[in-house]
Amino acid sequence: MSTAESIEKQTELNPGLVQALNAICAEQPYTVSWYVKDLVTGAQADRGGHVAYPSGSTRKTAILMAVLRAVHSGRLSLDEPIVYEERLRKNVMSGTFKYLTPGFTISLRDALVQMIIISDNVCTGMVLERITLGEINEFCQIVGMKDTVHRTNVPAPNMPIDHALDEVTVISATDQGLLYQAILKGAGNAEAAARIGCTMELCAFAIEVLSWQKLRNKISAMLPFDAKVAHKGGTGKRGRMDGGIVYRDGQPLYIITVYTDQVPVTMPDGLPGFYSAFTTMARLSRTCWDVLGAQAGRAA
């Protein structure tokens, strides 16, 4: 059976792996939703995969791709110069640019890089002055992200921990998985890239930028230090989230996306809730690494 045939025929993820992932989630006093796709066999599974949760900065992967779509159409240029103005750091919570002296110029390309690899919200603001929420939502619909709605440019910093979903951008674990699949397919196939309004080169650039992620926690925390992980995490008032493509020996092994919600500030054992969410995501990804890596080794 060819690889293409196996991807078409095998749709259920290793049952033992699914059981192990769900057992990790069941240990937690908060909600954990995940989506996993085995990129060797095409098998996939999810836990609450179509439930929409606050996106945090995982939304920035879709923003990146919507911008690259606009670049391909000729509406935007990666070389466009952007001046860092004082107004851009107002109410910014994440990144490093807010600590820098305004007045210098960077390119749109570099603003995208900083938006992804350190989740810089000054740079996110720069980018979102050049792409509309309508364009981002249109891109998500093209990908098939039916549970996703981009509502705001930068969320209000003073939102309560129990804020409503309709106050923020929302994404489901399955939607985010579909997005990473579309990018990966586009990097290797011109027709797949064209379906999302990009080129193979732009999709490959997106994966490269996502693999430069400097915040190596969450899904990458328990993986070998040299493992390539093209991902984007996020921080929300209600939880933490992450997702991306994990490579092994230079080849894409699996896609994993994880969303946590209603994470307590302090866990019953006294440790911070965010630490528990980070550890849960790391454990889920490591379990996939071990099981799917061994499975791929046997099939080789």
Image (tube, grey):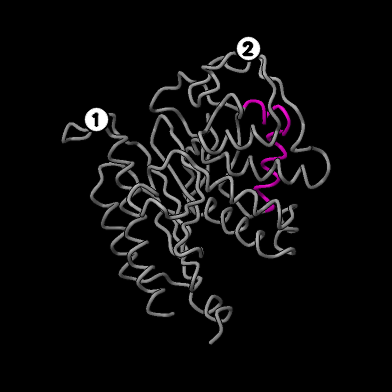
The correct choice, above or below, for 163 with respect to 26 in the image is: above
The correct choice, above or below, for 9 with respect to 230 in the image is: below
Residue at image location 58% in from the left, 45% down from the top: 209
Residue corresponding to mark 2: 86
Viewer-side residue, 108 vs 36 = 108
Give the CA separation, mark 1 to mark 2. Answer: 36 Å
Residue at image location 74% in from the left, 46% down from the top: 69
Residue 157 percent coordinates (x, y):
48, 20
Residue at image location 42% in from the left, 45% down from the top: 259
Residue corresponding to mark 1: 266
Residue 71 tag number: none
Q: Is residue 228 left or right of residue 275?
A: right
Dominant SS in magenta: helix
Q: Is residue 133 magenta?
A: yes
- Label 2 Cα crowd, 10 Å radius (few <14 / some 14-19 / many 20+): few
Q: Residue furthest front?
A: 226
Q: Which quadrant of the view contains residue 236?
A: top left
Residue 105 percent coordinates (x, y):
70, 22
Identify the amino acid type marked 2.
Answer: Glu
- Label 1 Cα crowd, 10 Å radius (few <14 / some 14-19 / many 20+): few
**What is the magenta range?**
125-142
Q: Secondary structure at mark 1?
A: loop
